[in-house]
Image: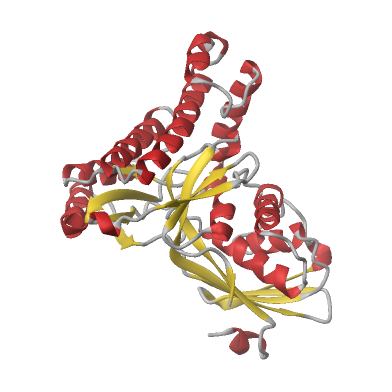
Amino acid sequence: MSFEDVFGAAPDVIAAAPGRVNLIGEHVDYSDGFVLPFAISNRTTVAIKKRNDNKIRLASAQRQSSIFETTIDDLQPGADGKWERYPLGVVWALGIKAGLDIYVDGRVPLGAGLSSSAALECSIATALNELFDLNLDVRDLARATQKAENDYVGMPCGIMDQSISLMGKSGHALLLDCRDLSTKLVPMDLASSGLELLIIDTQAHHALIDGGYAERRAACESAASKLGKSMRELTFAELEANKSKLTETEYRRAHHAVTEIARVLDCVQALEAKDFVRVGKLINQSHFSLRDDYNVSCPELDVAVDASLSAGALGSRMVGGGFGGSAIALVNRADIEKTKSAVTKAFIEKGFKAPRFFESLPSEGAEIL
């Protein structure tokens, strides 16, 4: 099926945006921290055509049996719904007042922690920016798509996923300062060192809107309020000196945030020096912190990480919001199949659903096609 098949005419604009993997810097984007994601090759493509009325019609290549219909006047933040809330939220956040026909082809695995939602939002935003001559830059679009997810969908995410989907560059990770959205491209040349980044989809699919994500963000904000500093500004020594002011949960959440922000900056230095042994150690430390301080891992993610390390990976960790989704493993190219076999064997022994594997080099961000 295509746009023409569904709507009987050609689209006015086609755009695409990628999912992402965050090399390191998890659950710190909403604490004004630093993150180090890269765009992956899996992308969501959207085709859009203006209408002469205020009707919005949405169709998806992955859901060919139905067309969702609403109107511009009926867009309501917090309304019940499913996948359609994400594109509708972007239409709302950008203040679009014209009717639209929208066709979505999403090729970022759902529920795998690879930010399929941001890929959808950013492809829509990129297309609408072109179609309506909004002249917004990528930072404006990142803020608008975050607003769509925060205020329309009701998911209190940070801005990392939308930023890397819009700003990604081939061959690079992106050091993103989540306070002001300033960026620095960091070369990530794994191939010349004989390495690859293996993505392990545990198929323990997650749903972050269930409150677990919001609880952790609230704990960090409460700790910041009690200590008078954001996690970005707080040093480890200050956190330890003021531990008694926090609940045990607040302390553990803050401990992760403060140490994770430091690990991101250390990882940039290690990548620039091509010290991939150091990169691997930092990735491991990130997983242990997410597992023990932030409590967002799950048995499938832990098994994937442990099996990868046992097979010789330099580093491995869960990625994304957690509670399921994917892990990454930094491995020697010669050990890819060995690592896949070790993870698969460990999953079988635990009675888990078989994992999926794929590899991706750092890729380009959103674009008009």
Count the numbered circles shown.
0
204 relative to 105, above or below: above
**Which residue is at a point 47% across and 56% down the rendered structure image?**
20
Whether residue 367 appears in this view of the structure is yes
- State the quadrant of the C terminus: bottom right
330 relative to 81, above or below: above
**Which residue is at a point 50% across and 73% down the rendered structure image?**
62
**Which residue is at a point 63% across and 39% down the rendered structure image?**
179
Q: Give x and y (percent) for residue 2.
A: 56, 85
Query: How does the figure colour the protein chain or chains?
Result: secondary structure
Whether residue 354 appears in this view of the structure is no
Q: Is residue 331 left or right of residue 291?
A: left
Quick one: which residue is furthest to the front in this view? Answer: 273
Q: Give x and y (percent) for residue 163.
A: 58, 53
Q: Give x and y (percent) for residue 87.
A: 66, 64
Q: Based on the displayed image, in which of its 4 quarters is residue 267 positioned? A: top left
276 relative to 14, above or below: above
Q: Nearer the viewer, residue 46 or 359?
A: 359
**Which residue is at a point 46% across and 28% down the rendered structure image?**
256
Q: Nearer the viewer, residue 98 or 190?
A: 190
Q: Based on the displayed image, in which of its 4 quarters is residue 5 positioned? A: bottom right
Q: Is residue 6 left or right of residue 328?
A: right
113 relative to 234, above or below: below
Q: Is residue 9 left or right of residue 355?
A: right
Q: Give x and y (percent) for residue 156.
A: 63, 43
Q: Based on the displayed image, in which of its 4 quarters is residue 79 positioned? A: bottom right
